[in-house]
Amino acid sequence: MKSGISKITIYIVVILLAANNLEGQNRVLLTKKNGLFKEVFWVSELDKNVRDGKSTTYYKGKVIEQGQYSDNKRVGKWRFYNLDSILDYEFDFDNNELLMVSGIDRHDLKRKSPCLFMGSPLIPYLFLVNNLSYPAKAIDNDVEGEVVLALKINKEGKVFGFYIYQKLHPVLDRAVIDCVKTMPGDWRFIPATNMGHVVPGEYHITIEFDLEYVKKTSLN
């Protein structure tokens, strides 16, 4: 009897090992770089465009997004971080549910949740920063400070409008508006909720115009 049990155990182990080896053969680990961004992810061996497995995105070597793909779709729990590698929020794609948001108590989150970018908050911020130019007129007049952009997000998580929430100077405000018009149209947001109901909301992005930074970069 003991011998029979041992044989069955061995057979089970062999089957499990074979299954694991087969899974490894069906997937390939790739690294994709785009400037200071780097994504390390698994893809289908038959189609390198189909993400299937764990994916981690880095910015300047720091993790900003981490989770799982299945057949090119995000599944399970994903974590999204800010530039300081601090967890910004966690989202469950299987249940379409926010699990946690930095600075918000879990109990309060069930009653009311903010509008969030579907991904690391660094992505929309860096898009604006990298595509904005400091207008010469503002530099000549020593104008600096913060502009806060507000994106209007509907119940489906799509941008349907925008405006300057906090103005600074007409020239700088216009520069931000012109830049936001070039944002990718396929970006998606997590809609805000109130008492368990999805509601239209706003997503704010703060852009700082720093003359000292401009002077330093111009010297380089």
Image: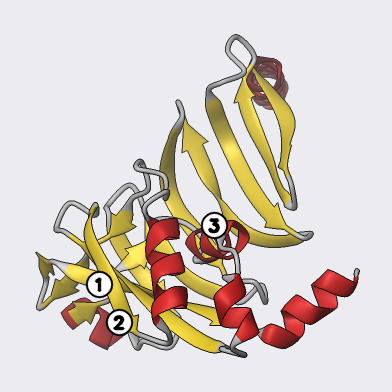
Residue 209 shows in this picture = no
Classify 37 as above or below 43: below
Mark 3 packing: few (<14 Cα in 10 Å), some, or many (20+)?
Answer: some
- Where residue 25 appears, as percent x and y from the top left, is 70, 15
Classify 55 as above or below 153: above
| Separation of marks 3 and 2 at Cα, in angstroms | 18 Å
The residue to which callout 3 is attached is 127
Callout 2, which amino acid?
A: Tyr
Mark 1 or mark 3, earlier in chain = 3
Q: Quadrant of residue 10?
A: top right
The residue under the point 12% across, 77% down is 194
Mark 3 or mark 2, earlier in chain = 3
The residue to which callout 1 is attached is 202
Classify 158 as above or below 161: above
Do the residues bearing badges 2 and 1 touch, measured as CB atoms within 8 Å? yes
Callout 3, which amino acid?
A: Phe
- Where residue 79 appears, as percent x and y from the top left, is 51, 61
User: Could you say which is closer to the camera, residue 172 or residue 60?
Assistant: 172
User: Could you say which is closer to the camera, residue 156 or residue 109?
Assistant: 156
Residue 204 shows in this picture = yes
The residue to which callout 2 is attached is 165
Secondary structure under tag 2 reads: strand
